[in-house]
């Protein structure tokens, strides 16, 4: 089996590394300061596969802080705003799309 | 109700302290996630999109008011004030912190609730008819046998590392409310010509990627032999089940590949060799378990009390009574289903306040007992008919008297992409939109019994294959699209639904379902012909034509 450190990683656009925080499970993003943030706007953006691999390896090394790190696509808007790149990531970042109470 | 004995209480409490220690070691970094994952899963803790999810077992769907209040407490104290009842008589909390989980587990253990058998490749929570013990015409209470199986299989080393998860369901009524034909093993309690209790045994049912209806393997296994026979099946599965390929690991694939005759011969061979294997059940053991179930001291009550006659003048009450109240085996009593499917609400969710209120109503009107059904509704199993009008008013105030049980808005739906990390598409908003489309109860009644089931991925937690109308979310080029099947059913005549055509986009699903229902109304040969029967009579074609002619 290929070690995760050598896994082929190919990204096709701007991406971030995301995971869930170990203590409470909330969605977190790897920052450029080698930490985690609950805000997508703080996430380190990677644009090449090498950068993505490096950021993911760094994230995976923090087993106490985070679970299940992976690379997720994002869109960078004209003003520099970072948006989730697909519906799954949108839901992880913004929360449920539903009303919890009958409406 | 069933009262746990000292052994069970010790087991549950030991689990809490074990898990507390494991969580502590995980949070300090002493355990890696790789090491911890299996331990958390053994305690019902999954990781979902937004948080950890905690799945708690409700064995055979029976809860005391005290237990329901404790579930409400867990929802309120450690979660976001609600819980989700699943298609396997479990409840899930969606927002719980790992650091809070040991306390939540301890609070539940106090009232005899645990999360064992809710996850992992082991024997899962044994499920049963939510009307067990109260349904008229039932052979006997199937929960006695569910409990015997639960005791035997809990933490049993031979069943803790099976090729894949393993689910057993038991019914004792003609009409199957436990969906036994879509379980790994389905047991139907009945009596032989000598009046002895035993089981028809079905094997190899299941949904997911490769759906199968269970096949009959033995028409009658005597009650005293049921543990050894089930164990013989599990041994054959343990030996031959595919551990190399997760998609082929369930027993349904083994039964399919070997063929039921060969599989059955293997099981018989094993069973013969076991020669009871020390598992033959003494009459006294069964009676001991039976004695730990307590039944209410029912009063002698009239079949038609004055309160009910008077309330019949209120059409809203009558609508609810006809829809949600079922006959009880004892005269003067009823079984009341509490719909967790309000128009516009997420199917199967209950708030902590609702749970507390239902617990109070159970104390007042149902001898402190509540049931949880696989259709994601609750039931009060012993309501005196004279109390129905008062109960209805209270339930209505709580939003739990939607008169839609078994109707088009009584939708079974999995959490889907709003919560689930395995999902391809959302389930809940589709259900919510459909309940709004069919919000008029008169229309829903006119349509009649129609089960819609929705799953957000092929794992089929929403049992879409056996919905009269099944909706399966898939992903295509980053978009949510939905495959629609019709003609499935989960009861004693269980059947897998047939696909009507290409998948449709999210925004069109509700329109398509409306088209299907309209086609049915035009095609049924009389108002009593149910949707599934029309599909059976005419096949998929006319529905397909209606849906795709203009698309
Ligand atoms: S069917 Fe799929 S999406 Fe729905 S709860 Fe199960 S695994 Fe999740």
Image (cartoon, coloured by chain):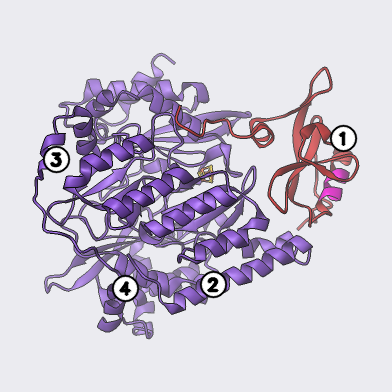
Query: Do marks 2 and 4 both belong to one polypeptide chain?
Result: yes
SS for dot 3: helix
> Residue at (52%, 67%) from the top-left corner?
B162
Looking at the image, is B192 positioned above or below residue B257?
below
Q: CA distance from mark 4 to mark 1?
A: 65 Å
Label 4 packing within 10 angstroms: few (<14), some (14-19), many (20+)? some
Q: Which residue is mark 2?
A: B13
**The color chain B is rendered in:** purple
Above or below residue B541? Residue B245 is: below
Mark 1: few, some, or many residues within 10 Å (few <14, many ≥20)? some
Q: Chain of mark 1?
A: A
**Position of B486 relative to B466 (above/below):** above
**Disc 4 and disc 1 on one polypeptide chain:** no
Q: Which mark is residue A48?
A: 1
A3 relative to B541 in the view: left or right: right
Type of secondary structure dominating the magenta stretch: helix
Mark 2 residue element? helix
Q: Position of residue B80 (x, y in %)?
A: 57, 44
Q: Are marks 4 and 1 in contact (CB under 8 Å)?
A: no
- CB under 8 Å between callouts 3 and 4? no
- The colour applied to the residues of chain A in this rendering is red
The answer to whether residue B219 is visible is no
Badge 3 is on which residue? B308
At mark 4, the secondary structure is loop
């Amino acid at each position: 089996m290929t070690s995760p450190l050598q896994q082929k990683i190919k990204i096709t656009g701007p991406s971030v590394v995301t995971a869930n925080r170990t203590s409470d499970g909330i969605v977190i993003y790897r920052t450029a300061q080698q930490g985690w943030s609950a805000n997508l706007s703080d996430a380190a953006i990677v644009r090449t596969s090498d950068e993505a691999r490096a950021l993911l390896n760094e994230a995976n090394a923090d087993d106490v802080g985070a679970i299940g790190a992976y690379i997720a696509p994002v869109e960078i808007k004209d003003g520099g705003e970072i948006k989730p790149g697909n519906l799954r990531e949108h839901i992880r970042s913004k929360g449920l799309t539903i009303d919890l109470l009958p409406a | 109700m069933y009262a746990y004995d000292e052994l069970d209480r010790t087991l549950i409490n030991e689990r809490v302290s074990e898990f507390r220690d494991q969580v502590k070691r995980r949070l300090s970094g002493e355990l890696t996630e790789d090491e911890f994952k299996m331990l958390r899963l053994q305690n019902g803790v999954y990781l979902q999109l937004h948080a950890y999810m905690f799945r708690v077992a409700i064995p055979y769907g029976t809860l005391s008011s005290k237990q329901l209040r404790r579930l409400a407490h867990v929802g309120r104290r450690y979660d976001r004030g609600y819980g989700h009842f699943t298609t396997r008589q479990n409840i899930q909390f969606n927002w719980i912190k790992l650091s809070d989980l040991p306390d939540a587990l301890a609070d539940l253990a106090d009232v005899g609730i645990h999360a064992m058998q809710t996850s992992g490749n082991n024997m899962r929570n044994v499920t049963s008819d939510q009307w067990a013990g109260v349904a008229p015409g039932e052979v006997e209470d199937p929960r006695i046998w569910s409990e015997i199986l639960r005791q035997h299989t809990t933490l049993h080393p031979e069943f803790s590392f099976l090729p894949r998860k393993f689910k057993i369901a038991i019914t004792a009524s003609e009409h199957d409310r436990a969906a036994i034909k879509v379980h790994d093993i389905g047991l139907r309690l009945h009596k032989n010509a000598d009046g002895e209790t035993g089981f028809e045994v079905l094997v190899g049912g299941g949904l997911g990627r490769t759906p199968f209806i269970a096949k009959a393997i033995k028409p009658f296994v005597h009650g005293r032999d049921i543990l050894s026979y089930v164990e013989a099946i599990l041994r054959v599965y343990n030996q031959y089940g595919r551990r190399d390929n997760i998609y082929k690991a369930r027993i349904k694939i083994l039964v399919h590949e070997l063929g039921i005759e060969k599989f059955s011969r293997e099981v018989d061979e094993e069973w013969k060799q076991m020669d009871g294997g020390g598992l033959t059940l003494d009459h006294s053991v069964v009676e001991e378990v039976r004695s730990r179930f307590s039944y209410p001291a029912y009063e002698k009550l009239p079949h038609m009390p004055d309160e009910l006659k008077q309330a019949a003048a209120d059409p809203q009450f009558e609508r609810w009574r006809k829809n949600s109240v079922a006959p009880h085996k004892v005269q003067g009593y009823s079984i009341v289903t509490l719909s967790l499917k309000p128009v516009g609400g997420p199917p199967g969710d209950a708030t902590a306040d609702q749970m507390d209120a239902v617990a109070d109503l159970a104390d007042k009107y149902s001898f402190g007992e509540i049931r949880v059904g696989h259709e994601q509704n609750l039931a009060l199993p012993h309501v005196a008919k004279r109390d129905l009008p008062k109960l209805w008013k209270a339930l209505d105030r709580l939003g739990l008297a939607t008169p839609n049980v078994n109707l088009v808005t009584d939708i079974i739906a999995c959490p889907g992409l709003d919560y689930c990390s395995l999902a391809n598409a959302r389930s809940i908003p589709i259900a919510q939109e459909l309940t709004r489309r069919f919000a008029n109860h008169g229309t829903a009644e006119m349509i009649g019994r129609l089960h819609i089931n929705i799953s957000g991925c092929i794992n089929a937690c929403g049992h879409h294959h056996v919905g009269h109308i099944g909706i399966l979310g898939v992903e295509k080029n980053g978009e949510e699209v939905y495959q629609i099947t019709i003609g499935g059913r989960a009861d004693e005549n269980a059947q897998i639904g047939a696909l009507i055509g290409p998948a449709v986009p999210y925004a069109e699903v509700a329109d398509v379902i409306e088209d299907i229902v309209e086609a049915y109304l035009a095609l049924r040969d009389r108002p009593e012909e149910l949707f599934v029967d029309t599909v059976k009579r005419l096949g998929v074609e006319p529905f397909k034509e209606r849906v795709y002619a203009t698309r």
